[in-house]
Image: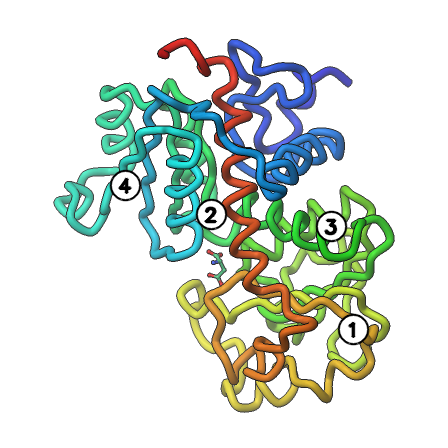
Amino acid sequence: MTKESKQTSGYPRARISPPSGEAFPYRHILGIEGLDPSEIQYVLDRAMAYADGEKGNARLRGLTQINLFFENSTRTQMSFEIAGKRLGADVVNLATSSSSIKKGETIFDTAMTLNAMRPDILVVRHGDAGAVKLLSEKVDCAVINAGDGQHEHPTQALLDALTIIRRRGRLHGQIVAICGDISHSRVGRSNIRLLSALGARVRVVAPPTLLPRDIDRMGVEVFWHMQDGLKDADVVMMLRLQNERMQGAFVPSTKEYYHFFGLTPEKLTVAKPDVLIMHPGPMNRGVEIATSVADDLDRSAIQEQVGNGVAVRMACLDILTRHLQGSTA
Ligand code: ASP
């Protein structure tokens, strides 16, 4: 199957023009869906080099990166900003709360306005699934999806994979239990795709109310009880209840949810002794995770995830701007 024919079947098949090289022949990073294992591995290899201390050598000098976040963010926005600056880009953050979006401008008019200022790369987060892809079709530059509704959060999945590989040496064959609000989580969705593509054994653990309807088609093992889903797990990835995306109540109470699905030292006894504990943040302590687990210095990789986020975002910015690098110096 050629790249062109795959573009029509997969979600994010925007082919780069001019190409940045065959290893990653796309103009945008909109999701994990549609990427080949070798393409994912290529991004991870670049990220690994940055995580190992490779300097950016001002590769993005003279290039303009705009961060356009229509939803709240701490880690993702900051790490994209730091990543861009480490690579020498001119980084601009549009504060949507004080922009014309508040005056009723549509995201497409905002995108066209920004496009007229000729940025080289746009990093976009939006509350609606698919909005970032639509926006990418209206602009001339590369676009990175920093989270669109409950759909995808590709750079989070990439940084999670990088964290597992750095800690465990490999992804292939690792038993990864993703627990909590699978239904509303873009992190869960992107991770299921990426981890499965690279050969991990992915489990999801959640009450039936927090499982997506199409879970049977996602190629994962499904568990309703933590003691079953965590058995012999190498990695446990906890997800936050995405209350902002819920209409109505999906759990009886947070107290009851914590009792059955909150990650505690007791529940972890069935996992591998050196199990890796992960969480994309922000954490709700006492809801999906106990403080003693989150702060377990030996087993928690939560702070490493944040650090690896910068390396992954440097890799994405670098790869998507290859054809521009050096042209403005
Ligand atoms: N920060 C992640 C996201 O933007 C996870 C979360 O918010 O729970 O999806």
Mark 2 touches mark 3? (CB < 8 Å): no
Q: Are marks 2 and 1 in contact (CB under 8 Å)?
A: no
The N terminus sits in image quarter = top right
Q: Quadrant of the C terminus?
A: top left
Q: Earlier in the sequence, mark 2 or mark 1?
A: 2
- Up the image or down, 206 lies above or below 109; here it is below
Q: Is mark 3 within 8 Å of ligand 1?
A: no
Residue at the spot 57% in from the left edge and 31% down from the top edge: 12
Callout 1: few (<14), some (14-19), or many (20+) C-alpha neighbours within 10 Å? many
The residue that mark 4 highlights is 93
Position above or below: 71 against 180: above
User: 53 or 127: nearer the eye?
Assistant: 53
Distance (Cα) linking label 2 and label 1: 27 Å
- Element type where label 3 sits in the image: helix
In this rendering, position of residue 122 left or right of residue 18: left
Q: Of callouts 2 and 4, which one flags the residue occurring earlier in the amino acid sequence?
A: 4
**Disc 2 residue lies near ligand 1 with CB under 8 A:** yes
Q: Bin the neighbour count of mark 3 within 10 Å (Cα to Cα): few under 14, some 14-19, many 20 and up.
A: some
- Give the percent coordinates (x, y) of residue 174: 82, 57
Nearer-N-terminus badge (2/3)? 2
Name the residue tied to disc 3: 165
Measuring from the top left, give residue 276's x and y in whole percent. 72, 67
Task: Please indicate, yes or no, whether residue 152 appears anywhere in the rendered image.
Answer: no
The secondary structure type at the circle numbered 2 is: strand
The image quarter containing residue 177 is: bottom right
Q: Whole-percent x and y of residue 270?
A: 82, 81
- Say which mark, if any, is on residue 323: none
- Residue type beneath disc 2: Gly
Q: Secondary structure at mark 1?
A: helix
Residue matched to label 2? 147
Which residue appears at 72% of the width and 89% of the height?
Answer: 266
Distance in Å between CA atoms under marks 3 and 4:
31 Å
